[in-house]
Image: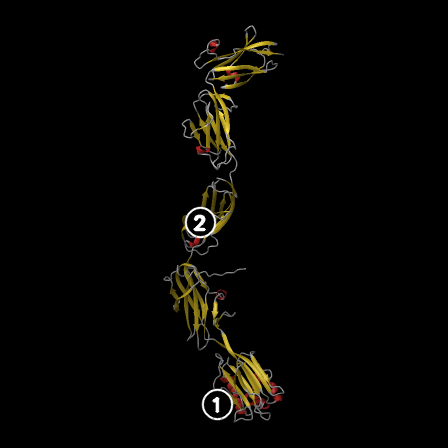
């Protein structure tokens, strides 16, 4: 679990701060330590001392060994006390170094000015009193004290059996004093006598001791590590930033004593991690950083340095702070807004994408650069770059992208990246990128082609008008690729007597193109030619916007133009009939305005008159009426079996009665009267 902490300053600026124990532990220490007591101090160092003690000098030297290497012969019976005695070494509480005995200080044996020990003839009560005074009243608490009982030979003595006599005169004994400091073997000297004895302790602290007493061989070695604090140390902060601009450094410390010294150094860190010391001795507790170039040094690091040669106690850094304007941080926020058209798109359908972009910092961003990238399955990419509006602190904008997929097909990867290549300095980049896969379904379906002549689907060989309205209609199921270009049509016409069809120019004035509009993808091409009599063949091909043909082969229709106004091949079917019959006839030239069929008896009596409106739509060419005669007269009476006649009566638009010219030179009918048989 990740944890973090912060400090709230009611009127403070944003920035970086360390004032808590666990915050400071994140730093790098060198010569300084921050123990669980939370009182900063210099690192502990020191040395190992070994005391060699023996009651003879023949086979092993008596004395002190430092760090298991350097040996100094410094503990031996003095010439004036060949019988033996106690030697005391006084180690400084701070440095651990030995205090020199100048000419027999504090009632000790005078052995000159260069000895590091105080010698006492402890068979003498006055000497014991002087020794007790030294270790109880003169040597300060915290000092290292080495007590060494030495004799020159087995006949010599330092008088432990006499020490208890001091209880009556001094109120204490050497036994009592040493046991109070932690010695546990010293009382054995009452019975063992003047055997070699070593005892090391820190005065007044107890517990941290080393003690040794000679065995039957008359030899003892005692090891002890003498600790001392360092005199200087430093701690280095973690990287601070990145910053848009630097403001100031604030710091303070506690437990500052004379002659403690301390300072702060500042290091600038570039984007590639290179460090440069930009201030090496800051003692002011408030220091201006506005002249530090944040573009050059987006990060800073602080170093606190402290020194104390005398007491070796470090001042304690209370806090240090860097106030600065933070870099902005833009991030994609799909939870607020994310819209993608579909995982699968039809070719030509627009790819539409939207996502929310938040500034999650307290610093403004300039107009934001956005990269949109399409990557196909062959790893070829297309990148579009847009710069959108500025993104204020704690603000939001919408990044939008739209493009047609008319030139796409297959699997794609769409990605968005805001503030690419750190177009403007930003705190984090991991939240600037999003990716989405989608598929474009290629348009492979052919459009549907439909051709009508004057609104009618003709049969091959049908008769049409000499000025027909040929409507070519092209329908495509893909509504995203509208047919809006006349070039998708290919029209040719084979004229009578020709062997090669002529291509109709798409700029022909007889052509009228209507592009697709609205929801349905339907385009039309209207062709209104003026044609002479004869047999023609129309050939038509159409394509959709993707280039798919309407069919593998062109649409073909053979038709005939007959300008002579005639109604021919009039007959009824079935004939004979019992329940109903309908009329079939061929119309050429033009469709008459008045068209009537009269049904008569053999004697010429009209029993039924059928109007054009009843017959339904009449067109040029072969007509088959929707009307079916059921053998009833105009009054609804059922006629009997027999032969009946029918006659077609027509008038032109001018009202000319072609019936009058039935037997003339211009014949409108090839057959004037027909016969039908009604069988009941």
Residue at 44%, 75% in the rendered image = 308
Point out residue 678 in the picture as x, y percentages from the top left corner.
60, 11
Near-viewer residue (70 or 209)? 70
Secondary structure at badge 1 equals loop
* Total numbered badges shown on the rendered structure: 2
Near-viewer residue (232 or 496)? 496
Secondary structure at badge 2 equals strand
Mark-to-mark CA distance, 2 and 1: 89 Å
Residue extending furthest left?
Answer: 291
- In the rendering, which numbered label is found on residue 371? 2
**Where is residue 638, by image quadrant?**
top right
**Where is residue 154, by image quadrant?**
bottom right
Residue 179 in sight from this viewpoint: no
Point out residue 408 in the picture as x, y percentages from the top left corner.
48, 42
Quadrant for the N terminus, please.
Answer: bottom right
Residue 224 in sight from this viewpoint: yes
- Above or below — where is 162 with respect to 571? below
Of badges 2 and 1, the one in the foreground is 2
- Above or below — where is 267 with respect to 178? above
Residue identified by numbered label 1: 104
Point out residue 292 in the picture as x, y percentages from the top left corner.
38, 62
Point out residue 155 in the picture as x, y percentages from the top left corner.
59, 93
Near-viewer residue (501 or 266)? 501
Quadrant for the C terminus, please.
Answer: top right
**Colour scheme of the rendered structure:** secondary structure
């Amino acid at each position: 679990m990740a944890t973090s902490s912060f400090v709230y300053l009611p009127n403070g600026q944003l920035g970086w701060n360390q004032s808590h124990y666990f915050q400071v532990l994140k730093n790098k220490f060198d010569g300084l330590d921050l123990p669980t007591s939370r009182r900063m101090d210099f690192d502990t160092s020191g040395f190992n001392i070994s005391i060699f003690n023996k009651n003879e000098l023949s086979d092993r030297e008596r004395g002190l060994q430092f760090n298991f290497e350097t040996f100094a012969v410094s503990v031996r019976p003095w010439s004036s006390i060949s019988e033996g005695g106690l030697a005391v070494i006084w180690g400084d509480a701070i440095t651990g170094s030995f205090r020199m005995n100048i000419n027999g200080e504090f009632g000790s044996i005078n052995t000159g000015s260069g000895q590091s020990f105080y010698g006492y003839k402890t068979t003498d009560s006055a000497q014991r009193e002087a020794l007790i005074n030294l270790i109880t009243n003169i040597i300060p608490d915290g000092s290292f004290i080495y007590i060494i009982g030495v004799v020159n030979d087995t006949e010599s003595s330092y008088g432990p059996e006499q020490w208890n006599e001091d209880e009556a005169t001094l109120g204490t004994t050497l036994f009592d004093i040493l046991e109070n400091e932690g010695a546990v073997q010293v009382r054995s000297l009452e019975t063992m006598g003047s055997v070699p004895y070593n005892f090391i302790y820190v005065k007044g602290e107890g517990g941290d001791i080393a003690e040794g007493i000679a065995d039957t061989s008359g030899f003892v070695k005692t090891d002890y590590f003498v600790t001392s604090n360092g005199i200087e140390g430093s701690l280095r902060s973690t990287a601070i930033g990145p910053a848009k601009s630097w403001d100031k450094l604030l710091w303070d410390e506690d437990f500052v004593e004379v002659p403690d010294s301390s300072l702060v150094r500042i290091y600038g860190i570039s984007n590639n991690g290179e460090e440069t010391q930009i201030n090496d001795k800051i003692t002011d507790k408030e220091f201006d950083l506005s002249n530090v170039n944040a573009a050059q040094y987006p990060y800073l690091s602080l170093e606190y340095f402290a020194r104390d040669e005398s007491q070796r106690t470090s001042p304690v850094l209370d806090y240090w702070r860097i106030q600065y304007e933070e870099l902005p941080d833009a991030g994609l926020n799909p939870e607020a807004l994310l819209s993608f058209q579909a995982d699968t798109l039809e070719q030509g359908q627009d790819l539409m994408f939207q996502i929310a972009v938040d500034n999650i910092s307290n610093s403004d961003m300039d107009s934001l650069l956005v990269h949109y990238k399409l990557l196909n399955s062959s790893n070829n990419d297309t990148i579009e770059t847009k710069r959108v509006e500025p993104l204020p602190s704690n603000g939001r904008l919408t990044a939008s992208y739209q493009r047609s997929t008319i030139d796409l097909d297959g699997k794609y990867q769409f990605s968005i990246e805001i503030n690419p290549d750190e177009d403007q300095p930003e705190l984090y980049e991991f939240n600037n990128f999003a990716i989405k896969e989608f598929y474009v379904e290629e348009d492979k379906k052919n459009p549907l082609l439909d051709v009508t002549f004057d609104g009618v689907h003709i049969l091959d060989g049908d008769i049409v008008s000499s000025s027909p309205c040929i409507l070519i209609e092209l329908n495509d199921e893909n509504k995203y690729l509208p047919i809006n270009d006349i070039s998708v049509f290919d029209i040719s016409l084979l004229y009578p007597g020709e062997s090669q069809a002529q291509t109709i120019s798409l700029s022909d004035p007889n052509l009228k193109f209507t592009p697709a509009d609205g929801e349905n993808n339907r385009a039309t091409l209207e062709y209104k030619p003026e044609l002479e009599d004869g047999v023609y063949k129309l050939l038509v091909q159409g394509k959709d916007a993707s280039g798919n043909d309407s069919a593998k082969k062109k649409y073909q229709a053979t038709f005939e133009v007959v300008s002579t106004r005639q109604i021919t091949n009039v007959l009824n079917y079935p004939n004979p009939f019992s329940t109903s019959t309908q009329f079939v006839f061929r119309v050429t030239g033009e469709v008459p305005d008045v068209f009537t069929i009269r049904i008569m008896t053999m004697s010429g009596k009209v029993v039924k008159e059928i109007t054009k409106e009843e017959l339904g739509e009449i067109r040029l060419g072969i007509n088959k009426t929707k009307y079916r005669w059921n053998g009833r007269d105009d009054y609804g009476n059922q006629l009997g079996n027999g032969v009946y006649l029918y006659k077609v009566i027509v008038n032109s638009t001018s009202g000319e009665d072609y019936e009058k010219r039935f037997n003339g030179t211009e014949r409108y009918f090839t057959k004037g009267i027909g016969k039908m048989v009604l069988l009941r």
